[in-house]
Image (cartoon, grey):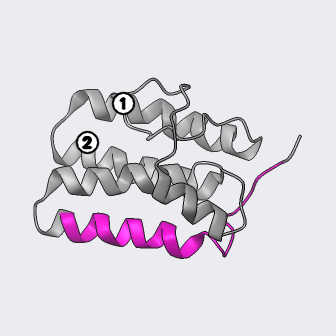
Amino acid sequence: MKLYTTLPATLRPAFEAELAAYRQALAHHDLRTAWAHLERAHILGQRYPFAHNRVHGLMLRFGIRIKSTREVLGQLPRLVFGGVKSFVGTVPIGNPGGANVPPLKPFPIPADLQAVFVRAGIRP
């Protein structure tokens, strides 16, 4: 079994770009776009415990900000178990990470993010 640790340097720019886009959309009160960028950051970072938990922490804060009990309660177990599952390489690939989707269900990776993985030399 492969143990995953930190986000590879080849993937970091795309991950950080999604988080920057999240912050920008949030600053402009565009909550739908902000959330979409968090989901994309989750897909990029979900295999790596620190990046994975960082996104779930932001999703928790987002849930608090929009006063969504469902999102807040949904993010708490993801914060506890998401990093562990990342560490041992058993995440549901493509899962966008929100409380509106089953936490263990894999999803298709959007084509543009698949290309990011390929350019980074990582098999999606």
Residue 63 disc label: 2
Q: As drawn, is 10 to the left or to the right of 29?
A: right
- Residue bearing mark 1: 99
Q: Residue at x 56, y 36 (%)?
A: 80
Q: Are marks 1 and 2 in contact (CB under 8 Å)?
A: yes
Crowding at mark 1 (Cα within 10 Å: few <14, some 14-19, many 20+): some
- N-terminal of the pair, mark 1 or mark 2, is 2
Image position of 3 with respect to 80: above or below: below
70 in the magenta segment: no
> Which residue type carries mark 2?
Gly
Q: As drawn, is 7 to the left or to the right of 31?
A: right
Q: Whole-percent x and y of residue 51?
A: 56, 58
Image position of 52 with respect to 104: above or below: below
> Which residue type carries mark 1?
Ala
Quick one: which residue is furthest to the left in this view?
29
Q: Residue at x 58, y 39 (%)?
A: 82
Give the magenta-colored segment's residue range. 3-25
Q: Whole-percent x and y of residue 14?
A: 50, 70
User: Which quadrant: the N terminus?
Assistant: top right
Most common secondary structure along the magenta stretch: helix
Q: Whole-percent x and y of residue 71?
A: 30, 33
Q: As drawn, is 98 to the left or to the right of 65?
A: right
Q: In whole angstroms, how far apart are the C-alphas of marks 1 and 2? A: 10 Å
Secondary structure of the residue carrying numbered label 2: helix
Q: Nearer the viewer, mark 1 or mark 2?
A: 1
Judge by depth and name the residue closer to the eye, 27 or 119.
119
Secondary structure of the residue carrying numbered label 1: loop
